Amino acid sequence: MTSYNELGEVYEWLISDAKLGPVEFAASFDDVLGLLPSDAHVLDCSCGTGQLAVGLAGRGMEVVATDASDVMIRRAQELALEFEARVRTLRAAWEELPDHFDDGTFDVVFCVGNSLHHAEGAGGRLAALDSMARLLRRGGRLVLTSRTWERVRAKGSRLDIGDRLVRRNGRDAVVIYRWEIAPGWEDEHHIEIAIAQLDGGGSVIVRSELLSCWPYRYNELAAELRQVGLRAEMSTFNLEAENYTVAASKV
């Protein structure tokens, strides 16, 4: 089962240089954040190590950060402490969110970091989106980022080895992705991600995790957003791009 408990310890090597700092991560969503009050209630429901949540809290927003991984929650807490940011953290999967929050609690819900494909199939994805939509006030927005799975599947199973060293915390590493592309769209796919760190003595320390994922086409995602009562307002979807962002409002 996908947990990110291994990758959570080295997740900063997977975050781009441009989004590594909380301020920079939050700034990448300025087009959406500019529509919100400065004290908006925000849920980051796949918070990872907390860069976005901490960046939003630094702007004065009331932020809750949730993740299904215990390690990610711990690391988000550590980052919030480092930046003296007020962030409430909670370990919870998408389907558990309505157990913890009332309907209509949040002005915006973020589900970023290419996380939605970990929901199990169309049924799991729809349940996750429905949970997020329920927590939005009327007129509130869901902001979601996704891999362009049409592009990923077209390339087939493969091994992608980073062509440069990535430096984090004074250490260098190579990032490696091994893609297992299943025959059908509805089948379980796998991504194995490895962080190969170089230590000062010339040794290599590898941390890796095999992640399950269920891909989807953009038009399927758009239809599912409508099904849970959300209307897409903005989309950067492009078949030639690796990732895209969708912002949808609650009708």
Image (cartoon, rainbow, N blue to C red):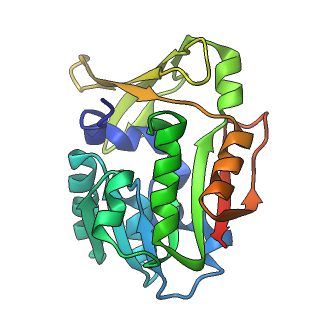
The quarter holding residue 61 reads bottom left
The quarter holding residue 220 reads top right
Residue at x 31% of width, y 75% of height: 85
Instruction: Say if 190 sits above or below 9 in the image.
Output: above
Please indicate whether residue 130 sits to the left or right of residue 68 in the image.
right
x, y percentage for residue 100? 28, 68
Residue 114 is at least partly visible in this image: no
Which of 76/63 is in front? 63
Please indicate whether residue 52 sits to the left or right of residue 11 in the image.
right
x, y percentage for residue 105? 43, 79
x, y percentage for residue 151? 71, 27
Residue at x 23% of width, y 26% of height: 200
x, y percentage for residue 94? 39, 53
Residue at x 59% of width, y 50% of height: 145
Q: How many marks?
A: 0
Q: Quadrant of the N terminus?
A: top left
Instruction: Say if 157 sits above or below 91 in the image.
Output: above
Residue at x 78% of width, y 35% of height: 239
